[in-house]
Image: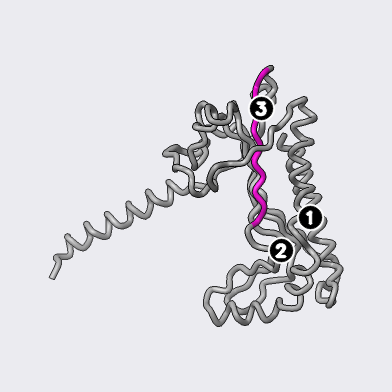
Amino acid sequence: MKSISSQLKIGAIVFVSVLLAACGSTPQGFVPLVKNNVQNQGTKIGFVYIAPEDQATTNIYGAGCLLCYGVASALTSSLDTHIESEISADELLVIKQAVVDGYGALDVSLQEITLAKPIDKMKKFDGENGFAKRDFRSLKQSKGLDMLVVLELNEHGAYRSFSNYVPNGDPQGYVSGTLYTVDLTTNGYIQYLKIDEKVQPQGNWDEPPTFPSVTTAYYQALENVKDSIKKSL
């Protein structure tokens, strides 16, 4: 049987390990674009747009068990049917265009490129906050670029929060993702924007089959994201 002192030592090691892991997982904060970084004459900037893998739906958060998730899914099933049939990934192209227009307003042209492999399959980059988590530096030579702009959208449609199987509120219009610009010499961010836009529907949301309040909230979320991109650039 371990002594009390040994147990205390093990407990201390575990605590420090958890603390260090927490410190190492600090979310990347907002990085506003310094316009001079991209406006230097001759700078070549690539652009990658990544649409969500999954179709628009009601994204459920907080339903922490299979039964809870089943109940939550049942509560949102009619809304899912509407969103999945009426909202396509093409709706997100207005956000892509906002990025192109934002750089265009700086007299900067973006060259849309295709990556040889998905970003999450690229080599990891061992850097602190302020640096991209994947190593993009090889693109400097392989694509002849100085910088890379990435717009990655992860989820869209509606967002609904639950405490297990109990709703915390109404479904909200929702778009999530990231927009970032990487210096291909250093792999450092010269711009970073986390996209996590939720818009509360006005009035009664539960109006099947077209759910006009939730649908309007979704399109307002798109507009809000466009405004955020404009301000960040």
Q: Position of residue 209 (x, y in %)?
A: 84, 77
Q: How crowded is mark 1: few (under 14 residues within 10 Å), some or many (20 or more)?
A: few
Q: Residues within 10 Å of mark 3 (few under 14, many from 20)?
A: few
Residue drawn 74% across and 57% down? Answer: 89
Q: Where is residue 180 in the image (x, y as percent from the top left)?
A: 62, 39
Task: Relative to 100, say whether 57 is above or below.
Answer: below
Magenta range: 42-52
Q: Where is residue 222 in the image (x, y as percent from the top left)?
A: 78, 52
Real-space Cα distance between discs 2 and 3? 34 Å
Q: Quadrant of the image for the C terminus?
A: top right
Real-space Cα distance between discs 2 and 1? 10 Å
Please tell me which of labels 2 and 3 falls first in the chain: 3
Residue nearest the viewer, comparing 186 with 12: 186
From the image, tell me which residue sits under label 2: 56
Name the amino acid, label 2.
Ala
Among the 4 quarters of the image, the one containing residue 165:
bottom right
Residue nearest the viewer, comparing 22 with 39: 39
Residue nearest the viewer, comparing 10 with 75: 75
Is 13 displayed left or right of 158 in the figure? left
Name the amino acid, label 3.
Val
The answer to whether marks 2 and 1 mark residues whose Cβ atoms lie closer than 8 Å is yes
Residue drawn 76% across and 62% down? Answer: 173
Residue 157 numbered tag: none
Task: Relative to 199, say whether 97 is above or below.
Answer: above
Q: Quadrant of the image for the N terminus?
A: bottom left
From the image, tell me which residue sits under label 3: 34
From the image, tell me which residue sits under label 1: 91
Secondary structure of the residue carrying tag 1 is: helix
Secondary structure of the residue carrying tag 3 is: loop
Residue drawn 63% across and 72% down? Answer: 162
